[in-house]
Amino acid sequence: MEEKANPKVLSNDSSTETRERPLLFMLSGAGKALPESAYKCFENDFEVTRLDAKSSTWEIGYTGKVGRDQSIVDAILSTCKDRNGRMAFLGGFSDGATAALSFLNIYPSYFDAVIAYSPGGMIGRRNNTVPVFMSHGFKDLCLPKKLSSDLVYKRLTNCHYVQFDGGHNVPSEVAESALEWAKRLLSN
């Protein structure tokens, strides 16, 4: 019997406003790491869902195959199919960002944009149409930016790349920059 995905919806908008908010799926990094700063500022404007890989990291980011995460991937794709015109963003931190970029190349018609904080790479061909926000710290020792984001950036043509003076993390000002970028996309 296959285990069902159990995504954790993080937004609790108790306002009486009935507008449909855009979707943001945030994929955690290895060991379920996902700094709260990566998504907290999005919660008022987006329906945010945090997702963890079934094992220590996302297989799709390194093998191009879904593997043990099939039920999670199916849940994301099903939600994106039934979104009723809402925009769908896919985001991630570290290995989760690598997975998000790889998803983009494997399932390009499901996502309107990707937010990749400190990715380690990308599986698949270059994608020229879906906008990508990518960030990476100059002092990242976990996934050095010269070996990861800098190489990914060269393969993308619609990418807003923010580099910051820091390590393997998501400073709140970088997340705020991602939110402003996303809001510009929503207003187009």
Image (tube, rainbow, N blue to C red):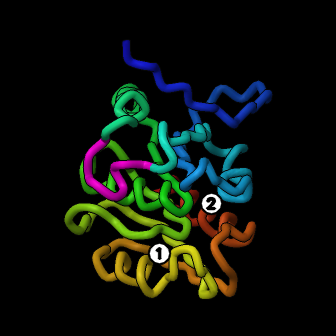
Q: Which residue is mark 1?
A: 160
Query: Which residue occupies 57% across, 83% down?
Result: 163
Q: Is residue 149 magenta?
A: no
**Tag 1: amino acid:** His
Up-down: is 93 above or below 84? below
Viewport quadrant of the C terminus: bottom left
Q: Is residue 22 in view?
A: no
Residue at the top extreme, as displayed: 1
- Magenta residues (range): 58-66
Left or right position of 47 against 84: right
Q: Tell me the residue at 48%/59% (across/down).
A: 95
Q: CA distance from mark 1 to mark 2?
A: 12 Å
Q: As displayed, is residue 103 above or below residue 22?
A: below
Q: Earlier in the sequence, mark 1 or mark 2?
A: 1
Q: Position of residue 92 (x, y in %)?
A: 52, 55
Q: Is residue 82 left or right of residue 118?
A: left
Reading the image, the residue beneath label 2 is 179
Q: Judging from the image, what secondary structure is the residue with disc 2 in?
A: helix
